[in-house]
């Protein structure tokens, strides 16, 4: 997977580099150059007025989302402790789930995770938890693959994650893989 730059269409206008929160785009010789730190979030593609950028290497497939329902929150942990942002997201998720008439679910991945039972105080209906040493080092690619698998299996209509530094690097990878 890569972001391809159409050098004939690119004008070097810098809209893409300004939109990239990962500083993954440089303008060299009035053309966009994509760096290795690109997470394929697609923000650059959305702002390009010249259609000079595209994500390649992903096969096109028509997805059927008719079976997707419920609201799902990614509950992030640090050293086994739930981050406060998760509780805030559960509160918002509960409001969304009630408006949609569906369930509020959550996914937590980590190692030596504290007791999750107090998360149900925030209106959570179901919790999917993977507590494994595989998640000990917070490697975003590992988390992204696990979350993609969970989304494909559990099929939430809405998936919400916190805009933490980890969430901002990992969730765009999930979105790119799922093409959402």
Image: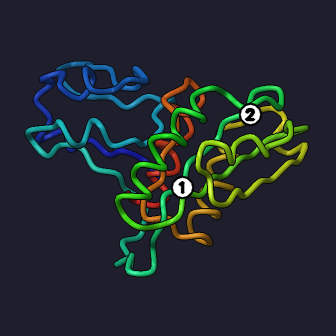
179 on left or right of 17: right
Please tell me whether mark 2 sits on a helix, a strand or a loop: loop
Circle 1 sits in a helix, a strand or a loop, which is it? Answer: strand
Mark number for residue 120? none
Q: Quadrant of residue 139?
A: top right
Out of 69 and 54, give the one closest to the viewer.
69
Neighbor class of circle 2 (other Cα within 10 Å; few <14, some 14-19, many 20+) is: some
Q: Which residue is mark 1?
A: 72
In this view, the residue in front, 150 or 19, is: 150
Q: Please tell me in which quadrant of the rendered image residue 63 appears.
A: bottom left
Q: Position of residue 3 (x, y in %)?
A: 36, 44
Image location (x, y in percent) of residue 132: 88, 48
Near mark 1 (Cα within 10 A), the count class, few <14, some 14-19 or many ≥20, is many
Q: Rounded to the nearest whole Å, what is the CA distance between mark 1 and mark 2? A: 20 Å
Q: Quadrant of the C terminus?
A: bottom left
Closer to viewer: mark 1 or mark 2: 1
Residue beneath the point at 42% across and 43% down? 40
Q: Position of residue 149 (x, y in %)?
A: 64, 64
Residue at 14% across / 46% down in the picture? Answer: 51
On screen, residue 73 above or below 70: above
Q: Residue at x 62, y 26 (%)?
A: 84
CB within 8 Å, label 1 to label 2: no
| Left or right: 82 in relation to 24 | right
In the visual, does 148 lie left or right of 12?
right
> Disc 2 marks which residue?
138
Relative height, residue 78 to residue 71 (above, below) = above
Compare marks 1 and 2 and give the one earlier in the sequence.
1
Residue at the image position 66 percent from the left and 52 percent from the top = 107
Query: Whole-percent x and y of residue 161?
Result: 52, 41
Decide: is 76 above or below 132.
Answer: above
Please name whichever residue, 109 or 81, is drawn nearer the observer in this view of the structure.
81
Residue 7 versus residue 2 in the image, above or below: above
């Amino acid at each position: 997977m890569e972001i391809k730059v159409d050098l004939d269409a690119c004008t070097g206008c810098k809209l893409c580099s300004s939109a990239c929160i990962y500083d993954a785009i440089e303008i060299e010789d009035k053309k966009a150059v994509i760096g290795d730190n690109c997470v394929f979030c697609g923000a650059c593609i959305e702002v390009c007025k010249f259609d000079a950028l595209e994500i390649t290497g992903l096969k096109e497939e028509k997805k059927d989302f008719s079976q997707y329902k419920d609201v799902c929150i990614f509950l992030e942990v640090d050293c086994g402790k739930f981050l406060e942002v998760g509780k805030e997201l559960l509160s918002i998720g509960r409001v969304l789930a009630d408006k949609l008439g569906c369930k509020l679910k959550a996914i937590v991945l980590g190692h030596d995770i504290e007791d999750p039972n107090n998360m149900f105080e925030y209106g959570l209906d179901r919790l999917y938890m993977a507590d494994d040493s595989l998640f000990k080092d917070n490697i975003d690619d590992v988390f992204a693959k696990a979350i993609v698998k969970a989304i494909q299996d559990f099929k939430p209509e809405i998936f919400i994650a916190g805009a933490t530094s980890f969430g901002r690097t990992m969730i765009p990878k999930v979105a790119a893989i799922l093409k959402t």
